[in-house]
Amino acid sequence: MATFLTSPSGRVIPAAACLGVAGRVKNNVVVFTNRDDWTIDGEAIKNEFGILSVRLINDFVAAGYGLLSLNESIECLTLQV
């Protein structure tokens, strides 16, 4: 995130961020499913980068929200009837 926010294309700090993470999110903190020693804290990200709102959500939840934005007539195919 630090690399992106300091790159020429990312110099504008976003007002909000929502990150899909592979693990159980509790109190806006995740300990990764496959890496017990890796932790992400949404509040710490908010404070470090000056983002007004940071929300961590499970990656499967994030994929589900992404499905809601699909245009079914253009972006979806029926595989079986």
Image (cartoon, helix red, strand yellow):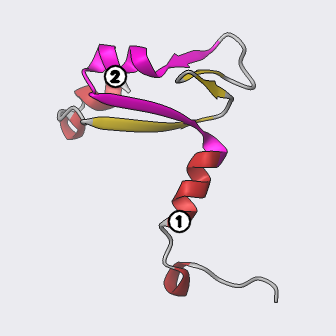
Label 2 sits on a secondary structure element that is helix
Q: Which of marks 2 and 1 is in front?
A: 1
Label 2 to label 1: alpha-carbon separation: 29 Å
Residue 66 appears at what percent x and percent y?
53, 58
Residue 69 appears at what percent x and percent y?
47, 67
Label 2 Cα crowd, 10 Å radius (few <14 / some 14-19 / many 20+): few
The number of numbered discs placed on residues in the rendered structure image is 2
- Residue receiving disc 1: 68
- Residue 2 badge: 2
Part of the protein shown in magenta: 38-60
Taking the view exactly as shown, the residue that stands out farthest to the right is 81
The quadrant of the picture occupied by the N terminus is: top left
- Residue 17 badge: none
The answer to whether residue 3 is left or right of residue 14 is right
Label 1 sits on a secondary structure element that is helix
Residue drawn at (41%, 17%) of the image = 43
